[in-house]
Amino acid sequence: MALKNSNGSKNGSGLWSAMRTPMGLWLTIALVLAVCSFIGVIVTGVLLHSMNVRMAGAESELSTLKDAQTLLLPGWVSLKDANVQPIGLGFLVVDLACVTKDGGVYVKGNVINTTAIDHYNTHFRLEFEEGRSAEFTVSSLRSGHSGGFEAIIPPPGDSTIPERGRILYLGSEVTYN
């Protein structure tokens, strides 16, 4: 008994002819699809690896940009740079030097007053990113002059010197010229 397709013909067109396709052709099609899928998985893996490498590079660049941006904020200074660095409100810091001492970090340097106001008993706070801090006082900061300071940041258990810190002006007694 011959099967007829939907339009009543027996000429081998339509669904019925697909059912009569030799098994070898179906196996070949299945093999081609499997190989294409395998190649797709490999290409996807290579692309994902490439993207991960690029993301790692981007994270490094973002970290560098974050560091640069942080140093632009008032008070943030590079603790390993002895050159003149602004700390805000008309003050600069210069000759910064840091060494480890008794498990903590010993920091010394000079604060420069660039304002037209004489400051006496000027209080500052030196902060590290980890939250450790110490306050120090410069007894006399006359207009256009500098004064030395020393601060010891207490040990947290790790006495490594961080890359940057923040020096904040807390207050002083002032006179105007």
Image (cartoon, rainbow, N blue to C red):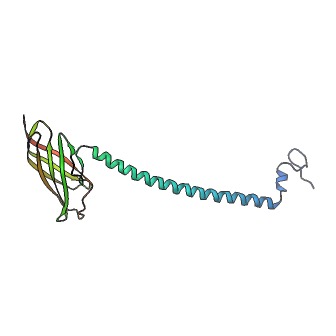
| Residue 72 screen position, x and y as percent | 28, 44
**Front one among 57 and 33:** 57
| Residue 147 screen position, x and y as percent | 10, 48
Give the image quarter of residue 176.
top left
Say which residue appears at 88% left-offset and 50% top-offset: 12
| Residue 47 screen position, x and y as percent | 55, 54
Q: Is residue 150 left or right of residue 52?
A: left
**Front one among 130 and 72:** 72
Give the image quarter of residue 31.
bottom right
Q: Residue furthest right?
A: 1
Say which residue appears at 21% left-offset and 44% top-offset: 87
Give the image quarter of residue 39.
bottom right
Query: What count of labels does the image hold?
Result: 0
Say which residue appears at 20% left-offset and 57% top-offset: 98
Q: Is residue 21 left or right of residue 36?
A: right
State the quadrant of the C terminus: top left
Q: Residue furthest front?
A: 83
| Residue 3 screen position, x and y as percent | 89, 52
Say which residue appears at 32% left-offset and 45% top-offset: 69
Q: Is residue 22 left or right of residue 122?
A: right
State the quadrant of the N terminus: bottom right
